[in-house]
Image (spheres, grey):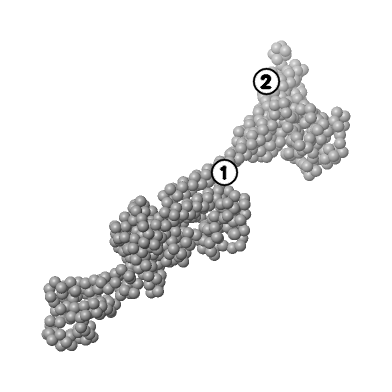
């Protein structure tokens, strides 16, 4: 060959080099295999010798081998890139359908098939169903379900082994069914490759690549599709884990919400219980418990006594359904709902004791219903306590006060009073409060007040009688009237009188206080309190102990004392002044003194009695006092 190259013409000598250069150009531009025959044909046409042609043939073969290697590497690079992209999709898995669609699409592209698709096993139905398709044109094919072991896909799903066929309908290895064959024929498939989707040893589905014309599938294509199937299985498992994680997180969040709500309900119930217990320990009443319930649960609360009468709230919130619900609540021992009302009722010895009716626009939870039930029990305990306290006080203090006002002649009353810490010779005020409210509540209130003030209390019909330490009967009567009215929720009218001394003084004070309360009612001052002395001349009609002296001292005392000390004639001047209709000149004429003297005397009266002594109401009492003074002293009229 060296000789041939040496003896050949210069043109022929460069042919191999030119041919090698030509093949490099062909490789560089990725020419088709047919184009690699071009340099040989050109050399032949130029008259190259056999050695040159043989050398070009060897160069062509080497170039085609390089071309094949380059194409395989390019294909492998594309496959690796597709696998890398698939792994990237898995790393950022957000939508399982999108990832599976991308895998099927890449399978179709890399294997250059007409269609690619994926089926997943259905453990409940025992078959496999179409999950994703790419390139499909048949609707029935996209809805296809394959029994295990039937068709190529059913066999792969059952065995977990890859299968492929260049001509599906002519391949006897597969069990053909009419349903599968019709769908495959409608899609026009001929060559099919199927590989299993594996999770460990479990087959969860099949990944397919198929052609509408006959073609064999190389081992490299089977391996590639297996790699893509592995990624698809990972994607499906990752999505399942994510779904389970999200579901678990959702359940945890829901459970946490329920736990938080339950915890809040428990804390609310504990707080309500502590508040109600504290109220009982501090001597709170039913109204205070009701305030706690409405503060915690909201709405409007009505508290009923054993006779169904409102202790708290209004009767407008009651109807027949409420009383039926109360009976059901006592029978069940739980809260009963009727419309917008929640009813909790407590009985003692099969007799109703109290009922709580809560009306609210929102739903009351079971835990909050327990708060209502607990409030009903606390209310029942308070009412029982009221009864026991009222009974105890009635047996001890009440009996003593009853004896003091009705049988003062009994022996040993002073000793009984001392044993209870009551010293009758100390200043006391007897108060009689008239009301038309509930006697039991009034008795409880009176007993509580007497206990706190170290006094006595009893009830006599619709009257509450109190004997309390003090020396201001009017102020005490007003306080009793105000506080008892607030407790009963309706007006209470109180009269008071001083009751200091033996038992007979208490009886007399009772009669006076009782008449004073009656006078207030007759005067239209229901709900007020006063002593007989504060009623002015009306006190003369109702008082027994003060008589005329007390009235004179209150209305005219300073003037009488002034005349007695200084020997003046202020009382005589007043009689003349009122007798002449308030005329200064006629008063001076009647007294035979100068008008200036009358003016000076009346100024002195104003200093003693106050500037309002000539106001109509005050003037009337002064005139009545002057009249009584004249009658007592036999003083002649001016």
Residue 572 visible here = yes
Q: Is residue 247 above or below residue 439?
A: above
Residue 513 visible here = no
Q: Is residue 423 above or below residue 510?
A: above
Residue plotted at (31% across, 55% down)? 423
Q: What element carries label 2?
A: helix
**In this view, which residue lies farthest toward the top?**
3
**Left/right of residue 246 with respect to residue 271 in the rendered view:** right
Q: Name the residue under label 1.
A: 258
Residue plotted at (76% across, 37% down)? 124
Residue 617 image position (x, y, % from top left): 29, 77
Res. 485 image quadrant: bottom left
Local crowd at mark 1 within 10 Å, few (<14), some, or many (≥20)? Answer: few
Q: Name the residue under label 2.
A: 17
Residue 430 image position (x, y, % from top left): 35, 62
Residue plotted at (50% across, 59% down)? 311
Estimate the spatial distance between the alpha carbons at disc 2 and disc 1, rounded to whole Å: 86 Å
Res. 19 image quadrant: top right
Residue 367 image position (x, y, % from top left): 56, 47
**Left/right of residue 316 with respect to residue 164 in the rendered view:** left
Q: In this view, does 425 lie above or below 435?
A: above
| Pick the front one: 317 or 123 | 317
Residue plotted at (48% across, 62% down)? 438
**Left/right of residue 114 with respect to residue 549 in the rendered view:** right
């Amino acid at each position: 060959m060296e000789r041939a190259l040496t003896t050949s013409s210069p043109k022929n000598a460069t042919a191999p080099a030119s041919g090698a250069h030509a093949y490099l150009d062909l490789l560089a531009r990725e020419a088709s295999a047919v184009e690699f025959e071009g340099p040989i044909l050109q050399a032949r046409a130029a008259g190259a010798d056999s050695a040159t042609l043989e050398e070009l043939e060897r160069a062509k073969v080497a170039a085609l081998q390089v071309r094949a290697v380059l194409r395989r590497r390019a294909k492998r690079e594309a496959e690796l890139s597709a696998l890398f992209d698939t792994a990237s999709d898995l790393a950022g898995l957000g939508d399982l359908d999108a990832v599976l669609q991308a895998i099927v699409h890449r399978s179709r592209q890399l294997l250059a098939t007409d269609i690619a698709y994926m089926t997943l096993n259905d453990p409940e139905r025992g078959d496999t169903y179409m999950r994703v398709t790419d390139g499909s044109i048949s609707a029935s094919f996209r809805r296809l379900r394959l029994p295990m072991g039937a068709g190529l896909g059913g066999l792969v799903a059952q065995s977990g082994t890859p299968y492929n066929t260049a001509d599906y309908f002519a391949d006897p290895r597969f069990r053909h069914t009419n349903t599968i064959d019709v769908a495959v024929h409608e899609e026009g498939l001929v060559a099919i490759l199927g590989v299993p989707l594996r999770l460990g040893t479990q087959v969860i589905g099949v990944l397919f690549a198929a052609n509408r014309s006959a073609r064999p599938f190389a081992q490299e294509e089977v391996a590639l599709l297996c790699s893509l199937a592995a990624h698809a299985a990972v994607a499906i498992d990752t999505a399942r884990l994510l779904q389970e994680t999200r579901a678990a997180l959702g359940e945890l969040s829901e459970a946490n919400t329920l736990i938080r709500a339950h915890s809040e309900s428990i804390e609310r119930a504990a707080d309500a219980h502590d508040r109600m217990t504290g109220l009982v320990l501090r001597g709170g009443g039913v109204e205070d418990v009701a305030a706690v319930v409405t503060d915690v649960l909201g709405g409007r609360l009505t508290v009923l006594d054993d006779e169904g009468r409102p202790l708290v709230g209004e009767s407008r919130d009651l109807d027949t359904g409420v009383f039926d619900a109360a009976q059901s609540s006592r029978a069940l021992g739980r809260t009963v709902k009727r419309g917008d009302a929640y009813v909790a009722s407590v009985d003692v010895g099969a007799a109703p004791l109290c009922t709580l009716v809560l009306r609210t626009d929102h739903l009351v939870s079971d835990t909050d219903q327990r708060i209502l039930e607990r409030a009903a029990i606390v209310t029942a305990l308070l009412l029982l306590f009221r009864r026991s306290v009222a009974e105890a006080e009635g047996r001890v203090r009440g009996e003593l006060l009853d004896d003091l006002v009705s049988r003062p002649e009994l022996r040993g009353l002073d000793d009984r009073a001392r044993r209870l810490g009551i010293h009758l010779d100390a200043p006391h005020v007897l108060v009689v409060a008239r009301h038309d409210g509930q006697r039991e509540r009034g008795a409880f209130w009176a007993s509580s007040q007497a206990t706190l003030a170290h006094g006595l209390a009893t009830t006599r019909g619709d009257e509450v009688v109190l004997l309390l330490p003090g020396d201001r009967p009017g102020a005490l009567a007003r306080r009793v009237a105000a506080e008892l009215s607030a407790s009963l929720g309706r007006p209470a009218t109180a009269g008071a009188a001083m009751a200091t001394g033996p038992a007979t003084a208490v009886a007399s004070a009772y009669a006076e206080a009782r008449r004073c309360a009656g006078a207030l009612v007759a005067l239209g001052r229901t709900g007020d309190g006063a002593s007989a002395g504060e009623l002015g001349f009306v006190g003369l009609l109702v008082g027994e102990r003060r008589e005329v002296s007390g009235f004179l001292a209150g209305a005219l005392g300073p003037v009488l004392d002034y005349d007695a000390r200084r020997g003046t004639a202020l009382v005589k001047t007043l009689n003349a002044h009122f007798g002449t209709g308030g005329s200064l000149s006629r008063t001076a004429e009647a007294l035979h003194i100068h008008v200036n003297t009358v003016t000076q005397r009346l100024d002195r009266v104003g200093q003693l009695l106050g500037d309002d002594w000539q106001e109509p109401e005050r003037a009337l009492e002064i005139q009545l006092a002057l009249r009584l003074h004249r009658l007592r002293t036999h003083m002649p009229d001016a």
